[in-house]
Image (spheres, helix red, strand yellow):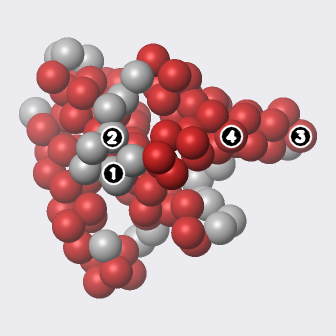
Amino acid sequence: ESLDKTHFSLGLQIITPYSNERSTDELQLTSTTFIAIEQIIASRCREIPNPTFRAPLADFLVKAGERSIEMADFPLALKYITYGLDFLGGDEAWGSNFRLSLRLHEAACLACY
């Protein structure tokens, strides 16, 4: 459990400067952001304690998933997108983050295709 928290904390520390310095539309995924995403996933955390991190993390993950689809790495894409869906939340996300929810579900369909 302590190691899981360390992975999660490290991932957030790496990714936070990227999310603060650009709007999510301008965000460029780099090897560093992929490392941060992998750290967060390594934490095996499926729920984000702080709700303000949910949508930005889900946005990072859908972008990582879309990039993985472009590279034809469909299993990795599905892993990223699934975590993005988990982080964003269940049915309530459709009301609060409709566009991101739709994008995640469309990307999941592409990754499974």
Are dots 3 and 4 in contact, CB under 8 Å? no
Percent of width and height locating residue 7: 73, 34
Give the residue number, with chain letter if any, for mark 4: 13
Above or below, 86 against 36 in this view is below
Other residues around mark 3 within 10 Å, as few (<14) / some (14–19) / many (≥20): few
Quadrant position of residue 65:
top left
The label shown at residue 11 is none
Percent of width and height locating residue 54: 50, 62
Are dots 1 and 2 in contact, CB under 8 Å? yes
* First in residue order: circle 3 vs circle 4: 3
Q: Residue at x 22, y 34 (%)?
A: 66
Q: Residue at x 65, y 67 (%)?
A: 50
Above or below, 76 against 6 in this view is above
The label shown at residue 27 is 2
The amino acid pointed to by label 4 is Gln
Other residues around mark 2 within 10 Å, as few (<14) / some (14–19) / many (≥20): some
Kindly report which numbered mark, 3 or 4, lies closer to the viewer in this rendering. Answer: 4
86 with respect to 65 (left or right): right
Other residues around mark 4 within 10 Å, as few (<14) / some (14–19) / many (≥20): few
* Structural distance between the alpha carbons of marks 4 and 2: 17 Å
Give the residue number, with chain letter if any, for mark 3: 2
Percent of width and height locating residue 74: 24, 24
* Structural distance between the alpha carbons of marks 3 and 2: 31 Å
Quadrant position of residue 55:
bottom left
Res 40 seen here: no
The amino acid pointed to by label 1 is Thr
Total of numbered circles in the picture? Answer: 4
Give the residue number, with chain letter if any, for mark 1: 24
* Structural distance between the alpha carbons of marks 3 and 4: 16 Å
The amino acid pointed to by label 2 is Leu
Kindly report which numbered mark, 1 or 3, lies closer to the viewer in this rendering. Answer: 1
